[in-house]
């Protein structure tokens, strides 16, 4: 039974990593939002499974928050913003998708090897989740660095936060009050970012952050 539980946890955490690579590969905003919703769904399943294995009811709250907010509300809201602002559907990248994928593979391999060595004394559940979670965090950061579109950077930030939630759930170290605080912080950040996108579109007729750099260069 323990072997099956480990396999399921491993499958779900690995699924999150796979979906993270799918997000990096996307070159369309609406498709990217759909894949992010899929990642949030896998996260909610992974956290719910950890809640069952750890007999930790508060983790079910975390899973519900991830499912309701990140898999449903936020993707729908971002989709409406993209459609309402008439944002270019193509995802602008700083480097090519191929190079980004290679960098992602390298970061994932490095993080998994490093984390498995550092957590050698931890239990199997924590080791696997932490290794995959660090990879998801780094891939989210990679997306933020290699995308110039503000919407895709927002998605990268939330993907990074998904990895942190996966790590905290696996490490058995996140009390309910912290989870709720994080959820509300993400919601507030989403609202602020939404206002920023509207203002950026209104001012520069674009959500490409390079427009801000151009204005700063002109002022200098």
Image: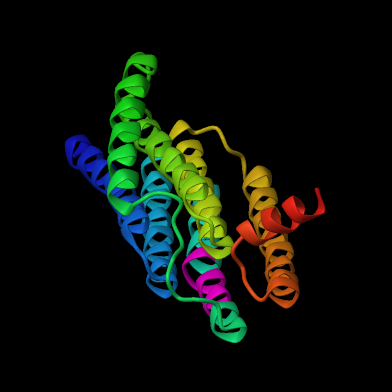
Q: Measuring from the top left, give residue 123's x and y in whole percent.
A: 34, 23
Q: Measuring from the top left, give residue 201's x and y in whole percent.
A: 68, 74
Q: Quadrant of residue 135?
A: top left
Residue 63 in view in this figure? yes
Q: Is residue 171 above or below residue 210?
A: above
Q: Is residue 51 above or below residue 106?
A: below
The colour mode here is rainbow
Q: Residue at x 38, y 18 (%)?
A: 119
Q: Where are the magenta residues, as a range?
A: 70-79
Q: Is residue 3 above or below residue 186?
A: above
As for residue 75 lying within the magenta part, the answer is yes
Q: Measuring from the top left, give residue 66's x and y in whole percent.
A: 51, 59
Q: Residue most toward the right? A: 219
Q: Residue at x 18, y 42 (%)?
A: 4
**Most common SS among magenta residues:** helix
As for residue 26 lying within the magenta part, the answer is no
Q: Residue at x 56, y 64 (%)?
A: 151
- Comparing 31 with 184, the one in front is 31
């Amino acid at each position: 039974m323990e072997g099956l539980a480990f396999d399921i946890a491993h499958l779900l955490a690995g699924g999150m990593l796979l979906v993270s690579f799918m997000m990096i590969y996307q070159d369309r905003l609406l498709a990217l939002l759909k894949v992010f919703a899929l990642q949030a769904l896998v996260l909610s399943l992974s956290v719910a499974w950890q809640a069952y294995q750890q007999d930790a009811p508060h983790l079910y709250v975390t899973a519900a928050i991830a499912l309701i907010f990140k898999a449903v509300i936020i993707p729908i809201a971002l989709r409406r913003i993209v459609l309402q602002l008439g944002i270019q559907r193509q995802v602008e990248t700083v480097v090519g998708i191929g190079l980004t994928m290679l960098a992602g593979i390298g970061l994932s391999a490095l993080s998994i090897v490093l984390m498995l060595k550092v957590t050698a004394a931890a239990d199997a559940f924590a080791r696997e989740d932490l290794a995959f979670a660090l990879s998801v965090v780094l891939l989210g950061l990679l997306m933020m660095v290699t995308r110039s579109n503000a919407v895709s950077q927002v998605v990268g930030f939330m993907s990074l936060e998904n990895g942190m939630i996966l790590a905290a759930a696996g490490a058995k170290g996140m009390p309910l009050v912290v989870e709720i605080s994080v959820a509300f912080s993400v919601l507030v950040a989403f609202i602020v970012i939404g206002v920023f996108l509207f203002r950026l579109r209104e001012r520069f007729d674009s959500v490409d952050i390079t427009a801000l750099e151009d204005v700063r260069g002109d002022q200098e």
